[in-house]
Image: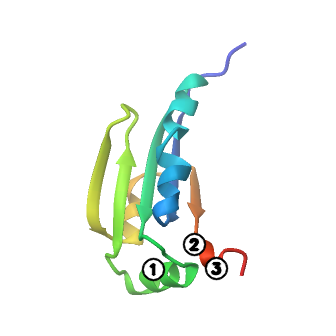
Amino acid sequence: MPSAARTLRVLAVGNSFSRDAVEQHLHELAMADGDTMIVGNLFIPGCSLERHVQCARNDRPDYVYRKVGVDGKRVETKSMTLARALADEPWDYVSMQQSSPISGI
């Protein structure tokens, strides 16, 4: 028996590469399985984990926030804080990404 359709909510906190990770095909993959998805991408180009921590601690509005709704439409908000993005939806999954040159350190 098929399961009921769900609305999944995924927020990526990252850098310019997080766009590739969540904005490109994630929405369509959920639809292919009969689900809908809300995708958030909160990013600062080249951002390190250290800078994410500084932004969180100081509530700095350094992020660009792109949100793809269940209808597939993108809305972009500049000068976003991590706290506001986290409060925007009851996110099911939140991922964090840092700049590539220091990944794995």
Specify few, some or many for label 1: CA neighbours under 10 Å numbering under 14, 14-19, or 20 or more. Answer: some
Furthest residue in direction top, as rendered = 1
Q: Residue at position x 34%, y 76% from top?
A: 62
The disc labelled 3 sits on which kind of residue? Ile
**Quarter of the image with the N terminus in it:** top right
Q: Residue at position x 54%, y 39% from top?
A: 26
The residue under label 2 is 98
Q: Earlier in the sequence, mark 3 or mark 1?
A: 1
**Quarter of the image with the C terminus in it:** bottom right
Is disc 3 placed on a helix, strand or loop?
A: helix
**Number of numbered callouts drawn:** 3
Can residue 91 be seen by looking at this rendering? no
Determine contact: label 2, label 3, CB under 8 Å.
yes
Left/right placement of residue 98 relative to residue 57 reads right
**Residue 2: image location, x then y, percent:** 68, 16
The disc labelled 2 sits on which kind of residue? Gln
Specify few, some or many for label 2: CA neighbours under 10 Å numbering under 14, 14-19, or 20 or more. Answer: many
Is disc 2 placed on a helix, strand or loop?
A: loop
The residue under label 1 is 56
Alpha-carbon span between mark 2 and mark 3: 7 Å
Alpha-carbon span between mark 1 and mark 2: 14 Å
Residue 20 higher or lower than 6, as above or below: below
Query: Toward the viewer: 29 or 103?
Result: 103
Front tag of 3 and 1: 3
The residue under label 3 is 102
Q: Residue at position x 49%, y 75% from top?
A: 47
Alpha-carbon span between mark 3 and mark 1: 20 Å
Q: Earlier in the sequence, mark 1 or mark 2?
A: 1
Can residue 58 be seen by looking at this rendering? yes
